[in-house]
């Protein structure tokens, strides 16, 4: 009888890092192609499969479900065992999870591009792909994270562990409930409400908390300082899950939904400032006396840059859902700028920091620091161009809407900003392909290449 070969520790995390960085390069490139439709509409015309309506959801869901979520899986596979003083519950399940995830994304992207879509924003995956996402992506991930925690050797749980456990549980539940729209044939305003409850939850109970959890791991770990305040971490955890799963209706401020629901969404949305700023204060105060590491240690630079982007993000998010401001900017490029500040600015910067961090430790080789610096500056400058041009275009559109200027005049007025967004986006995608190349070079470098001393050991080391 042959015994099953044991899979080395760290294989699942490594597979997830490499896959997610590939999807980051692909997903952002799809975003660039989408942007060309607004800056140079005649480019790549002639096939319906590259029309704005086909390619946009492929971009959005690839960056959310393949890049961000798979990077989260990598972080969970790596950080949960370290924080629990144990091994990942099942490396085999983890590796299978990522391969099935990759397969699912390929099928999902092709289907979406062919126009097979539920038509509901942020949950466009149609039946049975939506069931596949729950069964082969979120459930196995959740089982592995929870079982690792349940078989831990340490007593207490660090905030990152609570966040990861809660987020994966909430996300699986949320995604399954949202698909009930199909099962129970829910239509009209109820369908819209469920759609935006899910749309907002992807940020509120998944992307924001897990990014914060990763930041709370990386910053103390790499700075060598303990987390500044566990009380602030409690406030962040409870605040996020209490206030961030309720404001979905702020996407429907102009719709005929009950007025109390709009007020409720608006107030709970402003309250997100509390956990958001608690995290940012905690992260920055943890850096006390160690700010030189911002320059010297790349994962810290990425994580802190992302954290700093959280300041405009949380203020913008809080205020733009108050009725007066929402009335002005709703349906304009401002919203798209805000979405990218959250997912590309705040969240992706923190995750990229985590990928560099995990990459060096798992591959036991050092990445090329010059390529990493190119990546950082291309993404940072590209993002500033991207975000400012879209925000300005949003304000122009809003003014045109309020002063009842013909729509086509606002399209002409915002065109230069669309061009600027595409070129900012081009800088961003160039950075991601450099990142992928750097990863490839690191993975294929001779194993004998010296491992820096700060990478040699890995205990939890944070308190
Ligand atoms: C990790 C990086 C990125 C993430 C997480 C991301 C995420 C998103 C999200 C969530 C949306 C939907 C926005 C909304 O509904 O308001 C979106 C739309 C879009 N993104 Fe990205 N994106 C990324 C990178 C890029 C890049 C590099 C470009 C290149 C220019 C780009 C171009 C676009 C375009 C053109 C749209 C459609 C906007 C519209 O409907 O007017 N994205 N992206």
Image (cartoon, grey):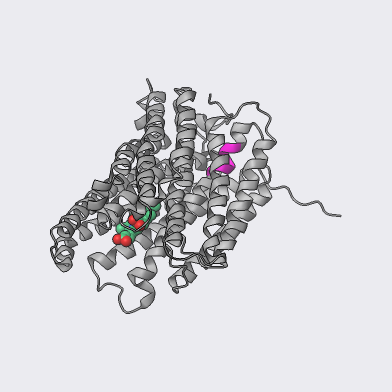
- Nearer to me, 86 or 152: 152
- 3 displayed left or right of 81: right
If the image is split into quadrants, where does the N terminus sit? bottom right
- Nearer to me, 209 or 235: 235
- 402 displayed left or right of 188: left
- The residue segment tinted magenta is 75-80
Q: Residue at x 39, y 48 (%)?
A: 261
- Nearer to me, 401 or 41: 401
- Which quadrant of the figure shows ligand 1? bottom left
Question: Farthest residue in the right direction?
Answer: 1
Count up the numbered dots. 0
Q: Is residue 229 magenta?
A: no
Q: Is residue 214 above or below residue 2?
A: above
- 77 displayed left or right of 382: right
Q: Is residue 385 above or below residue 209?
A: below
- 170 displayed left or right of 430: right
Q: Is residue 47 visible?
A: yes
Q: Position of residue 169 (x, y in %)?
A: 58, 45
Q: Is residue 362 visible?
A: no
Q: Position of residue 78 (x, y in %)?
A: 57, 40
Q: Position of residue 38 (x, y in %)?
A: 25, 65
Q: Main secondary structure of the magenta part?
A: helix
Question: Farthest residue in the bottom direction?
Answer: 46
Q: Residue at x 57, y 67 (%)?
A: 128
Q: Is residue 58 above or below residue 324?
A: below
Q: Position of residue 96 (x, y in %)?
A: 64, 55
Q: Residue at x 44, y 31 (%)?
A: 219
């Amino acid at each position: 009888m042959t015994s099953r070969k044991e899979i080395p520790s760290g294989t699942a995390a490594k597979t997830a890092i490499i896959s997610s960085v590939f999807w980051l390069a692909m997903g952002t490139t799809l975003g660039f192609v989408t942007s060309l439709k607004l800056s140079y509409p005649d480019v790549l015309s002639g096939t319906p499969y590259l029309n704005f309506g086909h390619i946009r959801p492929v971009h959005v869901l690839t960056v959310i479900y393949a890049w961000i979520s798979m990077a989260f899986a990598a972080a969970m596979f790596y950080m949960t065992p370290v924080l629990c003083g144990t091994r990942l519950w099942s490396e085999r399940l983890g590796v299978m999870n990522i391969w099935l995830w990759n397969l699912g994304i390929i099928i999902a992207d092709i289907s979406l591009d062919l126009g097979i879509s539920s038509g509901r924003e942020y949950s466009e995956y149609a039946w049975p792909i939506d069931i596949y996402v729950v069964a082969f992506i979120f459930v196995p991930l959740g089982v592995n994270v929870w079982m690792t925690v349940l078989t831990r050797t340490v007593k207490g749980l660090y905030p990152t562990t609570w966040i990861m456990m809660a987020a994966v549980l909430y996300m699986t539940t949320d995604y399954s409930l949202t698909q009930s729209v199909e099962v129970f044939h829910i239509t009209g305003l109820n369908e819209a409400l469920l759609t935006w409850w899910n749309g907002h939850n992807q940020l509120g109970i998944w992307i924001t908390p897990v990014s914060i959890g990763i930041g709370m791991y990386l910053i103390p770990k790499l700075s060598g300082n303990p987390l500044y305040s566990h009380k602030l971490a409690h406030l962040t955890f409870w605040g996020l899950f209490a206030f961030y799963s309720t404001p979905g209706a702020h996407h429907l401020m102009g719709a005929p939904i009950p007025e109390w629901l709009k007020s409720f969404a608006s107030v709970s949305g402003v309250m997100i400032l509390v956990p958001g700023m608690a995290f940012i204060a905690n992260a920055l105060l943890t850096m006390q006396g160690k700010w030189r590491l911002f320059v010297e240690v790349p994962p810290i630079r990425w994580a802190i840059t992302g954290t700093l982007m959280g300041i405009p993000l949380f203020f913008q998010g809080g205020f733009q859902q108050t009725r007066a401001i929402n009335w002005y900017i709703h349906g304009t490029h401002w919203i798209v700028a805000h979405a990218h500040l959250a997912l590309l600015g705040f969240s992706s910067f923190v995750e990229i920091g985590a990928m560099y961090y995990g990459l060096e430790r798992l591959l036991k080789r050092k990445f090329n620091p010059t390529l990493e610096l190119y990546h950082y500056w291309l993404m940072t400058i590209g993002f500033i161009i991207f975000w400012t041009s879209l925000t300005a275009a949003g304000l122009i559109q809003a003014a045109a809407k309020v002063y009842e200027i013909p729509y086509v005049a606002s399209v002409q007025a915002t065109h230069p900003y669309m061009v600027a967004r595409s070129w900012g986006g081009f800088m961003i995608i160039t950075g991601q392909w450099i990142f992928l190349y750097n990863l490839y070079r690191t993975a294929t470098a001779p194993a004998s290449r010296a491992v820096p001393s700060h990478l040699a050991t890995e205990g939890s080391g944070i308190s």
